[in-house]
Image (spheres, rainbow, N blue to C red):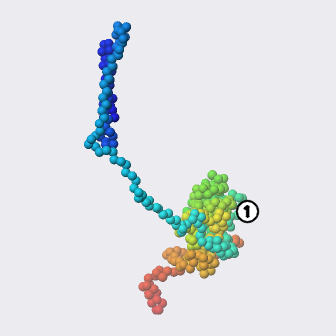
């Protein structure tokens, strides 16, 4: 490898240019040292000098000195040859791909679910559960205008949360007698509205929700209810279960499965979810992942009545159930909840005379707890009776 240098010299009448190439030593033993020094000078005359020397043979003087030198680095060893590849090649480790045959496919569905559903249909063929007589489909006035019917369906669904169908049906009868329309509920004071819907669960909160929802429907929907799940769940006191049931009953559109406490409980008992779900909304999503859409509408009605009559929250009647041989939770003991101290001994709801629900009487009885009286108190009472 060479490094070039150049020098320019100027005088009054002439100029000269000289350059040289200097070698650069390479220390690597892979290169053969080659050195070349080239020096070249040139002398050029001006136009005046050329005119003076006309006639004479003009010659250009050039001196070229060139030296070439090739040397090799004696101290370095020659370039080592490339090593040939070894005959014994390194064996690649092969990765064994194993497939889990037990992995659940994307199209998962529970075992024997069709048989279980057919059995539930047989047990619900009489249609005599409370949901059949006093559910949301039976609480509206069939002779009222369409928007009033849809509003009454929504009101009955709002009252049904944490409330038995018998209590909801009786409250809807009182509201209809009072005038269950958007304008009438908006103009009803909270005290009167509370007396009409009592004793539904959380009746004080539901009074507020009914007034707020009715005001929204009056100002934004002209007394009607929204025709979408998104619009319904924006209303105060309306959740996903109520929205899907309202779409089915009021608008005759199946948008999803209405999952309440009965559907949530029975779905987990039958193994209709991949894993145990924690709340009704998780159960709804789990059911909609595999259950055919044409069965969504009847699922709520079937399972709610089945849960009211056979698959009870505590002490289910497994011995009377047709699914006792194909239900994974059959004949499993369930712990009954103890009644709360201070709860009312009984409560009676009397529907209006002549109504379909007048034949139904609600008795909520509570057994006395053993620990209500101390041991000493019982002894004093026994002594008093003896005297």
Q: Position of residue 185 (x, y in %)?
A: 63, 59
Q: Is 275 or 353 nearer to us in this picture?
A: 275
Q: Position of residue 175 (x, y in %)?
A: 65, 64
Kindly identify the residue that appears in the image at 56 percent across and 68 percent down: 273
For mark 1, give the secondary structure.
loop
Q: Is 376 or 112 nearer to us in this picture?
A: 112
**Would you identify the image quadrant in which residue 279 lies?**
bottom right
Furthest toward the bottom, the residue is 386
From what the image shows, is residue 119 above or below residue 375?
above
Q: Is residue 86 left or right of residue 163?
A: left
Q: Is 2 or 34 nearer to us in this picture?
A: 34
Q: Is residue 301 at all visible to an observer of this figure?
A: yes
Kindly identify the residue that appears in the image at 48 percent across and 82 percent down: 370
Q: Position of residue 37 (x, y in %)?
A: 30, 29
Furthest toward the left, the residue is 75
- Position of the N terminus, as image quadrant, is top left
Q: Is 77 or 338 nearer to us in this picture?
A: 77
Q: Is residue 362 left or right of residue 33?
A: right
Q: Is residue 203 at all visible to an observer of this figure?
A: no
Mark 1 neighbour class, 10 Å CA radius: few under 14, some 14 to 19, many 20 or more: few
Q: How many marks?
A: 1
**Would you identify the image quadrant in which residue 194 lies?**
bottom right
Kindly identify the residue that appears in the image at 31 percent across and 13 percent down: 12
Q: Dot 1 corresponds to which residue?
A: 143
From what the image shows, is residue 236 above or below residue 108?
above
Kindly identify the residue that appears in the image at 26 percent across and 42 percent down: 75
**Would you identify the image quadrant in which residue 21 lies?**
top left
Furthest toward the right, the residue is 143
């Amino acid at each position: 490898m060479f490094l070039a240098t150049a020098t320019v010299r100027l005088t009054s009448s002439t100029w000269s240019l000289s350059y040289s190439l200097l070698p650069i030593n390479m220390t690597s033993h892979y290169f053969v040292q080659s050195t070349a020094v080239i020096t070249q000078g040139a002398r050029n005359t001006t136009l005046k000098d050329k005119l003076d020397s006309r006639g004479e043979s003009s010659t250009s003087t050039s001196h070229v000195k060139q030296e070439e030198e090739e040397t090799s680095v004696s101290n370095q060893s020659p370039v080592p040859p490339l090593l040939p590849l070894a005959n014994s090649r390194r064996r690649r480790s092969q990765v064994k791909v194993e497939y889990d045959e037990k992995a659940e496919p994307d199209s998962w569905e529970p075992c024997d679910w069709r048989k279980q559903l057919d059995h539930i249909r047989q047990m619900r063929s009489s249609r005599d559960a409370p949901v059949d007589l006093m559910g949301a489909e039976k609480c509206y006035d069939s002779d009222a205008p369409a928007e009033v019917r849809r509003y009454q369906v929504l009101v009955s669904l709002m009252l049904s949360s944490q409330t038995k169908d018998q209590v909801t049906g009786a409250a809807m009868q009182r509201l209809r007698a009072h005038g269950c329309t958007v304008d009438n509920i908006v103009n009803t004071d909270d005290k009167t509205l509370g007396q009409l819907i009592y004793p539904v669960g959380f009746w004080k909160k539901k009074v507020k929700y009914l007034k707020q929802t009715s005001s929204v429907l009056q100002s934004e929907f002209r007394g009607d209810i929204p025709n979408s799940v998104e619009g319904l769940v924006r209303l105060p006191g309306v959740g996903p279960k109520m929205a899907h049931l309202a779409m089915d009953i009021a608008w005759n559109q199946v948008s999803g499965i209405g999952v309440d406490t009965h559907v949530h409980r029975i779905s987990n008992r039958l193994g209709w979810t991949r894993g145990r779900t924690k709340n009704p909304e998780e159960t709804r999503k789990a059911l909609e992942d595999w259950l055919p859409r044409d069965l969504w509408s009847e699922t709520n009605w079937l399972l709610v009545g089945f849960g009211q009559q056979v698959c009870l929250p505590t002490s289910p009647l497994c011995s009377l159930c047709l699914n006792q041989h194909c239900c994974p939770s059959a004949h499993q003991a369930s712990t009954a909840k103890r009644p709360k101290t201070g709860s009312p001994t009984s409560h009676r709801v009397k529907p209006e005379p002549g109504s379909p629900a007048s034949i139904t009487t609600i008795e909520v009885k509570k057994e006395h707890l053993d620990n209500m009286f101390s041991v000493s108190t019982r002894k004093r009472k026994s002594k008093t009776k003896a005297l």
